[in-house]
Amino acid sequence: MQKAYTGASDRVNGAGILLAELAMNEKNPAQAEKYLLEMNTAAKGKNGQILEILGTYYLQQNNPAKAEEFLTKTIAVEPKNSAAKILLLGIYEVQNNTAKVNSIYSQLKSASPKVTNRQIGTYFGSVGAGSLAEKYLQKAINEDKDNNAKVVLGQVYAGLGKKAEAIKILQEAVNNKVNGAAEVLKQVQAMK
């Protein structure tokens, strides 16, 4: 794989991305960063995939300033990149930067296809940002009248150890006849 990466003329290829992932899995973030920065340089900072991976990498390394830099560059190259915008939304939420939160949120809501509050909340839930997941899933339920968001919110609550809240919202989902809600409710009720 190393040969496939170093032999490539532009160094922006699947082998480089895999090498960066392997380095992260081997707890060698410096090597991962080296591969990613080399690929970014080779792509002259114009490859949205590499920029987004760098932004995500810096978030994982708890460097929100660098993450913001690369995610902003991602959006400059790929204006419709919703994943990068959601990550930026999370950074701005943590910073309590209301102006930037509102700006990014407006972009997401007016995107085509439209990004829903449930999608934003689900994404935050999948990366372990429970309070942000809860905020956007509540918006989905209250503003968008999205009963399916109740199941996701119930799962988030269960993951946060809030069993009573999980059962309550999942019961609402069952009452609203949301597909799969009864099964999730049973699983949560069986939790210790």
Image: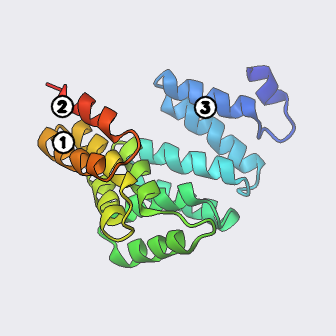
Going 41% across and 43% down the picture, which residue do you hit? 179
Residue highlighted by disc 2: 189
Report, in whole angstroms, how far the alpha carbon at label 2 lies from the one at label 3.
41 Å
Residue 95 in view in this figure:
no
Q: In front: 111, or 87? A: 111
Any part of residue 80 in sight: yes
- The residue tagged 3 is 20
Viewer-side label of 2, 3: 2
Q: Residue shown at 26%/53% (left/top)?
A: 131
The mark nearer the N terminus, 2 or 1, is 1
10 Å crowding of disc 1: few (<14), some (14-19), many (20+): many
Q: Is residue 22 left or right of residue 143?
A: right
Binning the other alpha carbons within 10 Å of mark 3 as few (below 14), some (14 to 19) or many (20 upward) gives: many
Which amino acid lies under the numbered mark 1 shown in the image of this protein?
Ile
* Horizontal and vertical percent position of residue 16: 70, 32
Q: Amino acid at mark 3?
A: Ala
Instruction: Tell me the SS state at disc 2.
Output: helix
Please, which residue is most extreme toward the right here?
Answer: 9
Q: Residue drawn 33% across and 41% down? A: 181
Q: Is residue 1 above or below residue 95?
A: above
Residue occupying the point 15% across, 38% down: 163
Q: Are marks 2 and 1 in contact (CB under 8 Å)?
A: yes
Residue 6: mark: none
| Sequence-first tag of 2 and 3 | 3
Q: Which residue is mark 1?
A: 167
Q: Is residue 95 above or below residue 169?
A: below
